[in-house]
Amino acid sequence: MSIIEVRNLSYTYGIGTPFMKTAVDNISLSVNEGEVIGLIGHTGSGKSTFVQMLNGLIRPTSGQVFLDGKDIWEKPKEIRKVRFRVGMVFQYPEYQLFDETVYKDISFGPMNKGLSADEVDKTVRRAAKFTGLSDKLLDNSPFDLSGGEKRRAAIAGVIAMDPDVLVLDEPTAGLDPLGRDLLLSQIMQYHKERKNTIFFVSHSMEDIARIADRVMVMNHGRLEMFDTPKNIFARVDEIESMGLRVPQITRIMTALRDKGYEFSDGILTVEQALDEIVSLLKKEGKI
């Protein structure tokens, strides 16, 4: 069942000025409930503008966004309700932290939804657990946390609103490899338990290949591709012509295939590559 649908969606900045620029150009697509959608594109391709239209932070110049079949701008005065259902985590979300304690920061959204004190408490602790924050950190100032902890606290604040659609705009940007892997695994675990829809914007092709069911590829505001990661990253030349790259392991395995090794195409992860190599070695009687 489709939860998000966009029809002929466009947005132009600076209309009527010399700086006019179309950031999103006539995009149409439909996303099913429970899907993880990866979104990639070069800097300035329109990714952030696109996802900000999904929850009404930006109103389209033309076209429509539908949530459960209803135009989110049908009743402009009720757009706030849409933002509870489509939660947005911006790039470097730790800059959104503002309250005295981590607990109060995470509880801001649930309290504004009108939940009881007991419901807020349960929601805050559940969201903190999802993002790997221990209870002992909840009474700390968010500004005393480490960089990775701040990131998780900010994400917990959005998760606490229990959105049907979670939009993550470069959530792992600036984290060290260990912190990135930890946060990514926590997001995957959250999705496994919550089974909601996730839009995941990233410059890391490895992250996209690891978690996405389908991938949007944007180029100069247009939707160039929308398909499975395997099919997307099989189009190496097209991807690279847009200033992007395929996952490193995909490039390595493709190069080996070109040299005559009998590997499958569309290998996206180290785990898949290892299985292929072991299988080939067994076939050749080398292990």
Image (cartoon, grey):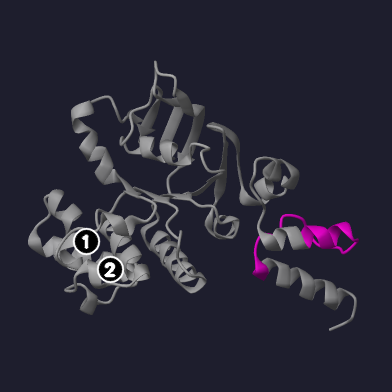
Camera-side residue of 239 and 43:
43
Asked if residue 31 is positioned above or below residue 129 in the image, the reply reads above
Query: CB under 8 Å between callouts 1 and 2?
Result: yes
- Residue linked to disc 2: 128
Which part of the image, by quadrant, shows the N terminus?
top left
Residue farthest along the left direction in this orientation: 117
Q: Earlier in the sequence, mark 1 or mark 2?
A: 1
Camera-side residue of 81 and 245:
245
- Residue 252 occupies quadrant: bottom right
Question: Percent position (x, y) of residue 7?
Answer: 46, 26
Numbered disc 1: secondary structure: helix
The answer to whether residue 8 is visible is no
The answer to whether residue 194 is visible is yes
Q: Amino acid at mark 2?
A: Ala
- Residue at left 66%, top 51%? 245
- Numbered range of the magenta stretch: 253-271
- Residue linked to disc 1: 106
Q: How many marks?
A: 2
Residue farthest along the top direction in this orientation: 16
Question: Percent position (x, y) of residue 197?
Answer: 41, 49
Q: Amino acid at mark 1?
A: Ile
Q: CA distance from mark 1 to mark 2?
A: 8 Å
- The 10 Å Cα crowd at callout 2, few under 14, some 14 to 19, many 20 or more, is many
Camera-side residue of 200 and 116:
200
Report if residue 10 lies within the magenta region: no
- Residue at left 34%, top 63%? 151
- Residue at left 77%, top 62%? 253
- Residue at left 45%, top 71%? 179
Report if residue 261 lies within the magenta region: yes
Question: Percent position (x, y) of residue 206?
Answer: 59, 60
